[in-house]
Amino acid sequence: MDNYRLQDFLKLGRRMKWVNRDEKISHLLKDMVTDFYDNVVIVEDLKPIGIFTTKET
């Protein structure tokens, strides 16, 4: 499995969504399918703390 950094995703230019860390995974998956997001950046206090990607689904 490849490791990516936030700057790698920003350079790819793919659609991203930013959500709070309390967001439910089921909602994220639904949004990724219906709205065609490749990446979801998880934030806490407006700072990125993680990335959920279609590669993980």
Image: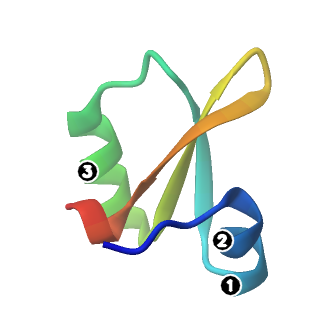
Label 1 sits on a secondary structure element that is helix
Closest to the observer: 25 or 27?
25
- Residue 4 image offset from top left, x and y in percent: 56, 67
Residue assigned mark 3: 30
Split into 4 quadrants, where in the image is the C terminus? bottom left
Q: Residues within 10 Å of mark 2 (few under 14, many from 20)?
A: some
Query: Which residue sits at x=44%, y=15%?
Result: 22
Q: Quadrant of residue 46?
A: top right
- Count up the numbered dots: 3
- Amino acid type at mark 2: Phe
- Residue 13 image offset from top left, x and y in percent: 72, 82
| Residue 9 badge | 2
Identify whether 36 is placed above or below 50: below
Looking at marks 2 and 3 on the same chain, the residue that comes earlier in the sequence is marked by: 2
Is there a contact, CB below 8 Å, between mark 1 and mark 2? yes
- Residue 50 image offset from top left, x and y in percent: 54, 39
- Residue 21 image offset from top left, x and y in percent: 50, 21
Q: Which label sits in the foreground, 2 or 3?
A: 2
Closest to the observer: 36 or 22?
22
Closest to the observer: 35 or 13?
13
Q: Which label sits in the foreground, 1 or 3?
A: 1
Split into 4 quadrants, where in the image is the N terminus? bottom left
Identify whether 55 is placed above or below 46: below
Query: Which residue sits at x=60%, y=72%?
Result: 15
| Residue 56 badge | none
Is there a contact, CB below 8 Å, between mark 2 and mark 3? no
Identify whether 39 is placed above or below 38: above
Residue assigned mark 1: 12
- Amino acid type at mark 3: Lys
